Amino acid sequence: MLWIMLSIQNQMFPRMTTNDTFQVWLQSPAPNGADGHFHSIAAQLQTSRIECNPCQMPPEGRNTILLLLNDQTTEEEEQECLKELLEPERHVIALYTGEKKLPFYRVWRLLSMGVDDVLDLRGKIRLADAVQSRLHRWSVIDRIVDSEQVQKTLLGSCPAWRKVLRQVVEIACFSTAPVLILGESGTGKELIARLIHDLDKRQDKQSLVLLDCTIIVPELSGSEFFGHEKGAFTNAVANRDGAFSLADRGTLFLDEIGELPLRLQAELLRVSQDGLYKRVGSNIWKKAQFRLVCATNRNLLQEVEKGDFRQDLYYRLSTCVVQLPPLRDRRLDIPELAEYFLAQALQTNTPPPFDPLMLNFLLTHPFPGNVRQLRQLITRIAYRHTGDGPVTIGDIPDADRDSLSFAPHGWQENGFKDAIRQAIADGVGLKDIKRIAADVAMDIAIEDAAGNLQEAARRLDVTDRLVQGYLAEKKTA
């Protein structure tokens, strides 16, 4: 079945100009290592309205670091410095000022550690232009990600989700390439496809056309894609436009592309490359130009190896790949999502809060059905809730309790025993096992609390001071 959605104009999103001003911080792994370069770099950046701040720890949050490196900087110094600098909302550009050629393995190592880009200042690069263009791009992306339109439809603020949204915004706004969206069922693939279409900057952009590949009837598949002429087959009582025609100058979203039969895969490859097709029952070639967005919960590379998916089509579709994280990898977003779904179900702007037991249950449940399963559960909880008080564990419907229950202390069986067994086999003593387990618990709690030390302490049932002391000791170690 085809679904057609109208385009949303790009004017809803904030725009920026190259005249915007920016700030950066110049850092070096070595103490005072940037002093000799600061004035020269600051003067260059000033020509592009970029204020360069001297070596000091920049404020937390969204900002950009210029990390000064040379051929004397060791790998250990780089790692230690980046450990302090890298944050989810922070960008780092490495500037190389050494006299020797910059080895590529070192560039790749920096990128793998989280650096956004590496600029070799020994070449003819115009530093101010290079930095300004990157700052402008990142600012545009961040403003769109923070826009009301995006935040109201794709809720979530955890680092993993924000990273995906930035990637989607950049792909949508700065390219017209095909996009392949990968993710488990219920992770929001269709919402991402709609966002890509909404952000597409084509001036003459038309509709978004959705075709679910799981419900295509083999006998009518040609008509679904190509359309047909009147009398082309029994019951073809009139001309009909197919998905390619309807998506002309718009976006064609093929959901569950992994279910498409091999015969249709070949046809799709031909149309996606040349834009030419014929209606069923016609000898006239027609042309359609559209942005192709596909989604699947299958591992298409494995399908290629098994011979169930064409390799050439895979590489055609995967020009840009977006991997959506499952809900278990973005647990910090569960309270926000649950509150939003509860407000929708109760049709109110001020939904009741979740009590601590209920919130703890939501945060620890695996939710194999991801956001879709969370939404359905909250909807069922909403019709059980009564009164003005908080949502409690008793609001979970009886029918859900058996399927949602889990054995007490099940975490001990979830690979924990195997890890301890391996540690003992490696000769690790009980004292070290206790210390390492405690450190891992601290790291997980701080990460899941998005750096909120009071919340991390609450989850671990320890004092704030203990968590603060752990972080201070970790930084000086």
Image (cartoon, helix red, strand yellow):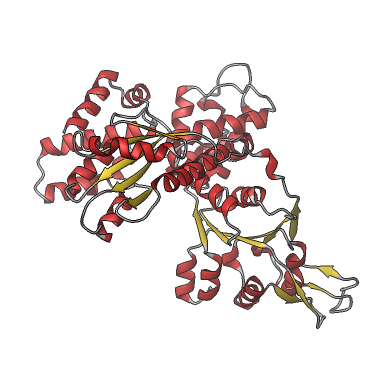
Quadrant of the rendering where the N terminus is positioned: bottom right
Q: Nearer the viewer, residue 106 or 373?
A: 106
Q: Is residue 75 left or right of residue 334?
A: left
Residue occupying image coordinates x 87% and y 71%:
239
Outermost residue, right side:
237
- Number of on-image labels: 0
Residue 405 image position (x, y, % from top left)? 45, 38
Residue 108 image position (x, y, % from top left)? 30, 56
Residue 309 image position (x, y, % from top left)? 53, 73
Q: Is residue 353 above or below residue 407?
A: above
Quadrant of the rendered image containing residue 35: top left
Outermost residue, bottom side:
283
Q: Nearer the viewer, residue 245 or 301?
A: 245
Q: Is residue 89 visible?
A: no
Q: Nearer the viewer, residue 46 or 402?
A: 46
Residue occupying image coordinates x 52% and y 37%:
156
Q: Is residue 61 left or right of residue 223?
A: left
Q: Is residue 265 visible?
A: yes
Residue 200 image position (x, y, % from top left)? 64, 51
Residue occupying image coordinates x 65% and y 64%:
213
Quadrant of the rendering where the C terminus is positioned: top left
Residue occupying image coordinates x 37% and y 26%:
452
Q: Is residue 69 above or below residue 440?
A: below
Outermost residue, top side:
388
Q: Is residue 360 left or right of residue 375?
A: left
